[in-house]
Image (cartoon, rainbow, N blue to C red):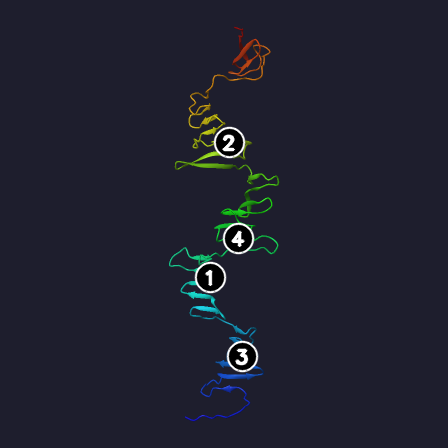
Amino acid sequence: MGYKFSLGERTFDDITAEVDAQANTKIDFEEDYIGLVTSGSSTLVVSGSMVGIGTTSPDYTLDVAGDIGVDQKIYHNGDANTYINFTDDRIRFEAGGLNLFGMHKKGSAPHQVTVNNGNNNVDFVVNTNDASTSPLLRCDASAGKVGIGTASPTEILTLNATEASILFQEGGTDMATIGINSSDNILIENKTMNKHIVFKVNDQGAVKEGFRLDGAVPEVVVNQTSDSLVDFRVESDNQTHMLFVDGSADKIGIKTNQPELALDINDNAIRIRNSSTPSSAGDFGVPGEIRWDANYIYVCVSIDTWKRVALSSW
């Protein structure tokens, strides 16, 4: 086989492959342009200082109009520990030797997208469009805390804002808020008409209602539902059961946790502060009502029917 060659510069038009029956495979020479054409399509071009694959008009140093396949890694030149690492069903982003971000389709669900994939001291930050404000969201890797509206969360979740609040929605409808109002009070609000705010407890495995702010009627209710059976207790400085409501026995105790009657007072005296004298034995009254004055104790024994006992000194 012989070859033709020449020394020095030569001027060419396009070079077409002789063995290509369709004559559509060639090297295309143009002004500041070289293109490799196969089957009539430009596969690779050099246009000025730019290279195009799948395009005849590259806009970048390397412009690929189509898919790119790599075996494993795409590196940043001159920076060997900054790259994108492709493995089977997994992509990892490495910067400066830190595995910052990863996506992994595991053998079975749940699959995983991970920030700080290498468990380094790398915070995850979402900023607002105002550089003068604190981050919208910050996950502090070293502290193990999350901040909303703060760069320095001090609790597992720290919310920093003026009159900070959390809004709960359902289908785009406001349902409830928990937050701080303009008077710096903690505010819990149910925004649904005639609905309640309910506090429940787990009583040895049984979930029972303990406290309810009733939205249907103007009431604050302790132990409302029949299956609650949660006792109510108020302590004082010296009494653990200054007031005790036995939810299962329907009894109230004062200074006792074992009331035996509807009202059981564990003391030696009670006081009705103000005197009141019925105008007559037929004055308005309900059975069981008790009044007193300087001379008598009055007891209403039936509707609008009073009896009295005289008081004497000794």
Q: What element carries label 1?
A: strand
Q: Name the residue under label 1.
A: 98
Callout 4: 10 Å neighbours few (<14), some, many (20+)?
many
Q: Nearer the viewer, mark 1 or mark 2?
A: 1
Q: Taking 4 as reference, is 282 above or below it? A: above
Q: Earlier in the sequence, mark 4 or mark 2?
A: 4
Picture coordinates of residue 98, whole percent (x, y): 46, 61
**Picture quarter with the N terminus:** bottom left
Task: Evaluate if marks 4 and 2 touch, with contact meaning CB atoms under 8 Å apart.
Answer: no
Q: How far apart are marks 4 and 3 (CA)?
A: 46 Å
Q: Name the residue under label 2.
A: 221
Q: Which of marks 2 and 3 is in front?
A: 3
Q: Nearer the viewer, mark 4 or mark 2?
A: 4
Task: Evaluate if marks 1 and 3 touch, with contact meaning CB atoms under 8 Å apart.
Answer: no
Q: Nearer the viewer, mark 4 or mark 1?
A: 1
Callout 2: 10 Å neighbours few (<14), some, many (20+)?
few
Q: Earlier in the sequence, mark 2 or mark 3?
A: 3
Q: Name the residue under label 4.
A: 138
Q: Mark 3 points at which residue?
A: 46
Q: Distance between the residues labelled 1 and 2?
A: 56 Å
Task: Evaluate if marks 4 and 3 touch, with contact meaning CB atoms under 8 Å apart.
Answer: no
